[in-house]
Amino acid sequence: MLKVSYLGPEGSFSHLLAMERWKEGCEFLPYKTINEIFEALMKKESDLALVPIENSFGGLLYDTVDELVSRNFLRSRLRIKEEISKRIKLCILGRKGEKPQRIYSHPYPLIYMRNWLKKNLPEVEIIEVSSTAEAARLSSETPGALAIASKEASKIYNLDVLYEDRSKKPKNITSFFVIGEGKNPRSGEDKTAVVFSLKHAPGTLYRALGAFAKRKINLTRIISRPHPERRKFGEYIFFVEFEGHEDDPSVKNALKNLSLSTLYYKTLGSYQRIEL
Amino acid sequence: MLKVSYLGPEGSFSHLLAMERWKEGCEFLPYKTINEIFEALMKKESDLALVPIENSFGGLLYDTVDELVSRNFLRSRLRIKEEISKRIKLCILGRKGEKPQRIYSHPYPLIYMRNWLKKNLPEVEIIEVSSTAEAARLSSETPGALAIASKEASKIYNLDVLYEDRSKKPKNITSFFVIGEGKNPRSGEDKTAVVFSLKHAPGTLYRALGAFAKRKINLTRIISRPHPERRKFGEYIFFVEFEGHEDDPSVKNALKNLSLSTLYYKTLGSYQRIEL
């Protein structure tokens, strides 16, 4: 049976998405942190992992980015298999009739709900926690505590839905990567991700990006991180995602050219973007 | 009297650094979030703000970056005045004789202390909170709760220092920006920060960086963020920091050249790096 790991506990948006994507016949394994999800994959405790990568309000999830650029990941046979995007519908959970004193939330939903909270719950203390499901779990244990979480989490943690976001705009979308072993075939609508590091000198990033610019390859994500294995300011590792498949002749050429100007370089996979 | 805002509550590393940098004759104003610090500056509730920008273990502080690239900041007269770097010495705080059950911490100290915690407190539940001082405050209210915080926070929150990190290596350094009004004169050892956005098309970042590469200007930070005012994937805003002062002829030339290839561009200031 296919084992899929996700950011738990049960009732998180990752959990809901995993159930929607893989339906029945899978075993879903919750982990407490992104780091533990990746460790489980390395140890083959699971076959696939579903990890959040970007939210349209909070931005990138750097815990995931840092695992993708870590030495252990780059040495592994793991690759990005899919990107799945999904609209997130947030709810305020709690118990009817209780006076709200605090609200638990992951930091990203707070950004989306900021104005609503200021208007409707101005006096309530905000406590940031590691996931929306953890927020619901903590809320279920504490009198007067609310949570920002999914509607489904209300059932699991025995809470009332006090408010449900139904606004069509602005859209709150989260994008996830599916991670697993092996290379995907070309689909015709692929993106490719690479990681590289550069000598810290004038013009190195400029030359590296030239590999893509000269072939009119469109970048879809560029993320710079302080180098995780060298604790010095000014040394960066780059995660770059662009349109095309690693087997496309122009992409092959660009990557060959890129490898000449980088200290280190690895392709993380070519994959499709799916909207659920 | 000079009013300096910082990320509170009292006893945070920001607070300690503010007291070291400005000594007496200042009023220090604690705020709960980076966003509130910036709002206070805009409303002139404070003259200067001290905000963390990067930790050598946790990486960049994106709450700060997002304020620096926000429309409100870019429209203001505020600029980066100084960068201050300081070695952070972490302690485990709690009450002697109590059995530890949970530990509160900002996420970044957890990365630095990860191995120590696995070895010495493997069974303790980890709860992430918004600052080290908030961790100490919560610990002081809860039996069996520890905190990762500064030695000074133990006095403020009446806790015992159960462990003090004395390791010389690896060095845990946090870098802060001082934000205020007005342009700094040239010191000869300056860095300059700019923010820009680009058309989403092949080669735009390559051409923008060419402005620096062609003049052998060394980049010291490059940060990309999903565009905060356009909630679409693939649109980025860039924060770039490099060596030199905005009044240096080569920098002036580079910025003039940069402005030709960007949709939007603004200099955030030229400033020195100070180590305390």
Image (cartoon, coloured by chain):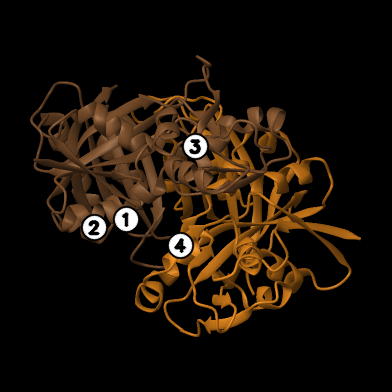
Chain colours: A orange, B brown
Residue B109 point in image, percent of width and height: 52, 35
- The residue that mark 1 highlights is B35
Name the side, left or right, on which B7 lies relative to A61: left
- The residue that mark 4 highlights is A126
Q: How many marks?
A: 4
Front: mark 1 or 4: 4
Residue A197 point in image, percent of width and height: 51, 32
- The residue that mark 2 highlights is B39
Q: Quadrant of the N terminus of chain A?
A: bottom right
Residue at mark 3: chain: B
Front: mark 3 or 4: 4
> Cα distance, mark 4 to mark 2?
18 Å
Residue B112 point in image, percent of width and height: 55, 31
Whether residue A185 is visible, yes or no, is no
Q: Are marks 3 and 4 on the same chain?
A: no
Q: Quadrant of the C terminus of chain A?
A: bottom right
> Cα distance, mark 3 to mark 4?
23 Å
Q: Choose the circle earlier in sequence order: 3 or 1.
A: 1
* Front residue (pair A217, B46): B46
Which three-letter amino acid code belongs to the residue tagged 2? Answer: Glu
Q: Residue furthest front?
A: B97
- The residue that mark 3 highlights is B58
Residue A20 position by quadrant: bottom right
Cβ atoms under marks 2 and 1 closer than 8 Å: yes
